[in-house]
Image (cartoon, rainbow, N blue to C red):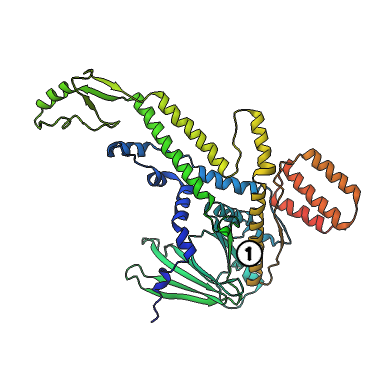
Amino acid sequence: MSDYSYLWKRENPFYSLHKETWERSRDAYSGGSDYIDLALIKHISEVDVEFVERRRRAYYFNYPRKIARLITQYVLSEEPRRRNAAPELEEDFSRSGLRTNEVMRQFSTMLNVYGEAWLLVDMPEFSGEIDPERQKRERIRPYALALSPLAVVDWSYGEDGALAWAVVAENGTYSPNPFLPPVRFSRRRLWTRDGWFLFERENETGMVFLKDSAAHKLDRVPLIRGIESDGFGMDANHWFEDAVRISDAILNNESEAQMNAVKQMFGLLVISESFARSARANTPDSSSEPGGGKFSHILARSAAIWESNEEKGISRYISPSGIETQAIRTENLNLKKELFDVIGLAVQKDSATEQTAESKAWDHQNVKQFLVSRADILEQAEQMAWELMHCWDRSVEVPEVVYNRDFAVTELKSSVEALLGLEQISHSGEFSKEIARSAVGLLEKINRISPAARRKILEEIDHAG
């Protein structure tokens, strides 16, 4: 019997190098109490009981998720054009109800979080003859899934520069019996240019066996890798790691500011040394050492401290002043501005004039080229996905996919006037059609139209004389 256990050990060197950072970026994007437990730092003068309280009180401003989603929203603010795309595939690209735009939105957000993402184009398994009626009834058609780089553990390229093979981790649960607990499984699927092999590892013994295999005759690996050309493409770390670290600093600073606010309401007790010694002498567990029992000699925000007779000797409460808390909040505000500046996003300034100027810089200079580059990656990946669908099923037509690359704020009035002016230049068929398609984009900016209506309008334009 063949030993397939090495399949669970192997990792691409690039995967091994960035795996830890990807996991941290994934957790930062996910947020919640689990990430607070991971990212909150206990400082050197903090006792355990105090840190536990601070951790329970902490809250997380999820800036990493906001950043990742905001970039995607800008890139896909205008729906891509897909000429001659099959409506049933466009409306259900994943075979699980996700439209093409939604799958590509996931792919784009993964690129923002990890700097790398994959698209898998697969086909449901079936046996026997297939006719159009059965194909429609059982929904036997290609589909596409967005995969994070953590799911594709290893891969290799052939001499022709294309993928030779890739290993995809498939971990999850299945519940064949509603009266029994779900069963967890750990699988690896090896994709080659000729077929796939599904391996599973037994939970009890750890033995790995070949569960299933099939030929696909695509002559290519049905996986598409997207990668930021100016990031990993230049052998550099991904910028999202820096965004996460700044966000972590904001989390820790805000937690300290919150505890300072609590301590302003509930101060720290200071007692005289003589009172502490007399109180210790009257307790059953008294000892010669001060600071035991009910009184602590450790300087901490949640414990009492005591003073010697040479000092004031007056029992009182002390607490942080509002100045420290305000300084922390000011620092966090600066960090937030730097965070968005790091990724090229404009933040609101103190005056409307500055805000308007920076908004224009956002639209016309700062990140336009970044967004155009991202649109190129998404367009190429989606086009390749449609081509793979055609390889799986020859009846699937490959559409012409065009992503928006104009991310400037459009002045509708001047744009409409410009279109009307172009209409007067030429009445050639294809030129007029392009003007009409642009007008559809302007119409959507004024009044959002449904995908079905938009598709019908574009079909009417394409079939116009």
- Element type where label 1 sits in the image: helix
Q: In this view, does 195 lie above or below 429?
A: below
The tally of labels here is: 1
Residue 290 in the image, given as x and y percentages of width and height: 15, 30
Position of 258 with respect to 272 (left or right) is: right
Amino acid found under the numbered disc labelled 1:
Ala
Picture coordinates of residue 211 (x, y %)?
44, 74
Residue 153 in the figure: left or right of residue 139: left
Quarter of the N terminus within the rendering: bottom left
Looking at the rendering, which quadrant does residue 220 occupy?
Answer: bottom right
The residue located at (36%, 39%) in the rendering is: 55
Name the residue at 43% across, 56% down.
20
Residue highlighted by disc 1: 385
In the picture, measured across the screen, residue 447 lies left or right of residue 150, that is: right
Quarter of the image with the C terminus in it: bottom right
Q: Is residue 282 visible?
A: no
The answer to which of 302 and 331 lies nearer the viewer is: 331
The percent coordinates of residue 148 (x first, y second) are 51, 58
Q: Nearer the viewer, residue 203 or 19?
A: 19
Q: Where is residue 173 in the image (x, y as percent from the top left)?
A: 42, 62
Is 33 situated above or below 188? above
The residue drawn where x is 66% and y is 67% is 387
